[in-house]
């Protein structure tokens, strides 16, 4: 329960910076890979809604993309052996899909620098979340 | 478990798609309502940060205004022929002194005043005028003293920009210069620069001058910031020596 609260607080703290580095996407990905599927879906929905409200483009667009990708990852999770390499690779693929989908939906250019920053921030953020929620920097 | 997850997904996905079928006006009302609830923590935080920022700038302005009023009060008393030879404030004792001479080789660099050790004047006591900073006591004789003003080449005092809080050092080189302002620092023409208080000699809050010109320099780290002095030394007829009272912090 405390972990769920931690995710929500982290989400609120990182949301203002997500215009530059998409930390919310990293948090959602982390929640999907480590937490219960129902919570992950609800969390992804909440994150999408908050993003829609904080960075208004078209209401519901982030919510749709986040929920759909979360369900896709929950499905794929069964077939993946999650080690650091596959985790990073899966995140990059899903993040690119999310970025392209959003870009097409709202007809906005793809920000390459944001993608690069987000990919670079992935590992430190996940390690920090691991430390905060599970007390270890890295899980097997 | 899998079935529950699927049902939840369908419900959330359906809810997510609802706004796409609503009119723009309805979406706007919906977003406004949801924002006021879901983004409440952020609104509170940003309001608080803004308030703290405004308050800190306001306190700084009021401190300056207070020291200006102290001096203005002294001048007005002087004009009313009240004896202002010694005036007490909670933190400082202001001793009024008349300028009785100037160094002929450095006309604005040194001032001779009609007060000395018998009046409590001591070396390194700060000197101010109604408009702001003047300098410090360089030499104290029995009945007269010499003031080294900021116009003397190499005179240095630690300072801070009131508006931006940038700390640096004000030094008389060719011009009165605010040193150690980095290229990345934002500083504007017209900003007030005051003493920072990071010194055992000068108390905080004495107006040194305003930023007159900012030039990018060849220096790798710092830019050139030139000040317009608050006080015109060549027009001074009287000054005030600040004598710290025992209760003065850092004094």
Image (cartoon, grey):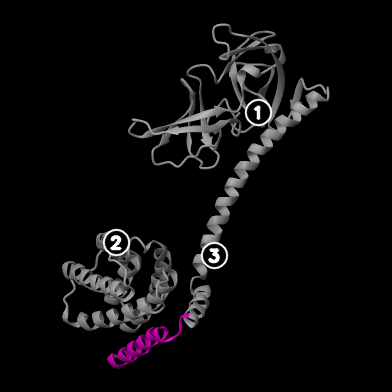
Tags 1 and 2 touching, CB below 8 Å? no
Q: Disc 1 is attached to a residue of which chain?
A: B
- When the figure is inspected, residue B175 is found, relative to residue A116, above or below; the finding is above
What is the secondary structure assignment of the residue under circle 2?
helix
**Residue highlighted by disc 3:** B44
Mark 3 or 1 closer to N-term? 3
Crowd band around label 2 with a 10 angstrom C-alpha radius: few (<14), some (14–19), many (20+): some
Magenta stretch, main secondary structure, is helix
| Rendered residue at 44%/86% (across/down) | B22
Closer to the eye: label 3 or 1: 1
Q: Which residues are magenta?
A: B2-24
- Residue A134 x/y as whole percent: 32, 68
Mark carried by residue A114: 2
| Rendered residue at 40%/33% (across/down) | B223
Closer to the eye: label 3 or 2: 2
What is the secondary structure assignment of the residue under circle 3?
helix
């Amino acid at each position: 329960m405390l972990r769920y609260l931690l995710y929500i607080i982290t989400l609120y703290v990182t949301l203002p910076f997500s215009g530059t580095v998409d930390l919310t996407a990293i948090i959602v990905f982390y929640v999907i890979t480590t937490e219960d599927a129902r919570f992950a879906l609800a969390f992804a929905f909440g994150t999408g809604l908050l993003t829609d409200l904080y960075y208004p483009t078209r209401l519901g667009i982030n919510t749709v993309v986040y929920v759909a990708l979360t369900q896709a990852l929950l499905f794929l999770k069964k077939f993946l052996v999650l080690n650091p390499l596959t985790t990073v690779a899966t995140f990059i693929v899903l993040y690119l899909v999310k970025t392209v989908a959003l870009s097409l939906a709202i007809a906005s250019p793809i920000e390459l620098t944001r993608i690069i920053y987000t990919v670079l921030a992935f590992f430190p953020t996940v390690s920090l979340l691991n430390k905060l929620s599970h007390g270890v920097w890295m899980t097997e | 478990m899998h079935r529950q997850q699927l049902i939840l997904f369908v419900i959330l996905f359906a809810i997510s798609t609802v706004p796409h079928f609503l009119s723009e006006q309805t979406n706007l009302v919906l977003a406004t309502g949801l924002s006021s609830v879901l983004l409440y923590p952020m609104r509170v935080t940003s309001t608080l940060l803004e308030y703290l920022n405004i308050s800190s700038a306001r306190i700084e302005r009021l401190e300056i205004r207070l020291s200006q009023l102290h001096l203005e009060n002294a001048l007005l008393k002087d004009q009313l022929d009240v004896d202002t030879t010694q005036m007490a404030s909670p933190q400082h004792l202001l001793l009024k002194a008349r300028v009785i001479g100037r160094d002929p080789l450095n006309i604005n660099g040194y001032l001779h005043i009609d007060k000395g050790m018998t009046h409590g004047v001591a070396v390194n006591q700060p000197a101010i005028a109604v408009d702001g900073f003047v300098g410090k006591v360089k030499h104290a004789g029995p009945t007269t003293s010499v003031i080294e003003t900021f116009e003397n080449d190499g005179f240095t005092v630690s300072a801070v920009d009131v508006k931006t809080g940038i700390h640096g050092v004000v030094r008389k080189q060719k011009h009165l210069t605010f040193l150690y302002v980095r290229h990345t620092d934002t500083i504007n023409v017209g900003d007030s620069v005051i003493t920072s208080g990071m010194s055992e000699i000068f108390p905080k809050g004495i107006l040194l001058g305003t930023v007159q010109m900012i030039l990018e320099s060849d220096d790798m780290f710092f830019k050139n910031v030139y000040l317009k002095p608050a006080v015109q030394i060549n027009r001074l007829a009287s000054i005030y020596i600040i004598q710290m009272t025992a209760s003065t912090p850092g004094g």
